[in-house]
Image (cartoon, rainbow, N blue to C red):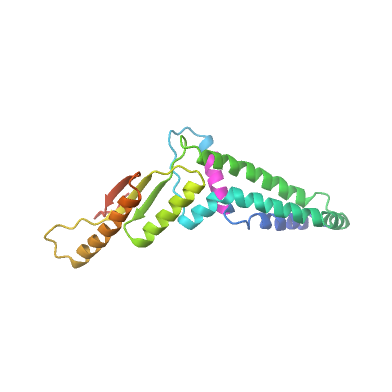
Amino acid sequence: MLDNAQEGGLQSQFQDIAFAIPGVDEAMSFAEVMKLVKSMDYSCIVFDTAPTGHTLRFLSFPTVLDKALAKLSEFGGRFAPLMQQMSGMMGINSNPEEDMFAKLNSMRTVIQEVNTQFQDPDKTTFICICISEFLSLYETERMIQELTSFHIDTHNIVVNQLLHPKKDSDCEQCNVRHKMQRKYLDQINDLYEDFHVIKLPLLTNEVR
């Protein structure tokens, strides 16, 4: 007969499978924030997201979770009799498979609630922050396209760290970078003429 520690170890293996799903870390982190938010009284919540790749994984999580649950259900249907027989032989009374599915379904409910709130333009909008360079502009466009496919409102872009050298400046680096930034600023203005584009200068002091 297995003791509680051994039984817990078996359940932990099923939990490891669940938490190997891409995006689950980001999704559960946000769910924890939302729990705190619900217990407090705020008129506006600012959620500072991770870089583009992590954020997109998080936003795609509800779909990924549904597919994962379907696969795990198929897995459980095939091996449930064998697992129950082994559990009985080892003296495990609880069903770790059922525990895992209960936790996954609970997780899915929370994430779907978050996803519904994300898709409500009266409650949520996404503000893209970028700098006036090729890679940042590329990532911003990628993010906006994905946000649109997820039905998440976005109509604000902040362009940060813009240089404004004086006309008589002899700083070659400043002038070269300013010219480069102007090039991508023009592209931003053309691409997002319907957006509210906010342009912020590069400051000489640290923002706190």
- Tag count in the figure? 0
Q: Is residue 14 magenta?
A: no
Out of 27 and 66, give the one closest to the viewer: 66
Which of the 4 image quadrants contains residue 195? Answer: top left
> Which x, y percent locates residue 64?
61, 52
The secondary structure that dominates the magenta segment is helix
Image quarter hosting the N terminus: bottom right
Identified at 43% across, 50% down, the residue is 144
User: Outermost residue, left direction?
Assistant: 168
Q: Position of residue 112 (x, y in %)?
A: 59, 42
Question: Residue at coordinates 56% horizontally, 49% vertically from top-left?
Answer: 27
Residue at screen point 72% across, 54% down = 72
Give the residue at x 25% y 63%. 177
Tell me if residue 1 can be seen: no
Q: Is residue 173 above or below residue 25?
A: below
- Image side of residue 144 versus residue 168, left or right: right
Residue 27 on the magenta span: yes
Q: What's drawn in magenta, residue-wise?
A: 25-36
**Residue 71 screen position, x and y as percent:** 71, 55
Q: Would residue 143 be seen by someone viewing this image from the given angle?
A: yes
Q: Judge from the rendering whether residue 200 lies leftward or rightward of residue 99; answer left or right.
A: left
Give the side of residue 129 with respect to residue 204, left or right.
right
| Quadrant of the image occupied by residue 47 | top left
Q: Nearer the viewer, residue 159 or 45?
A: 159
In this view, the residue in front, 123 or 182, is: 182
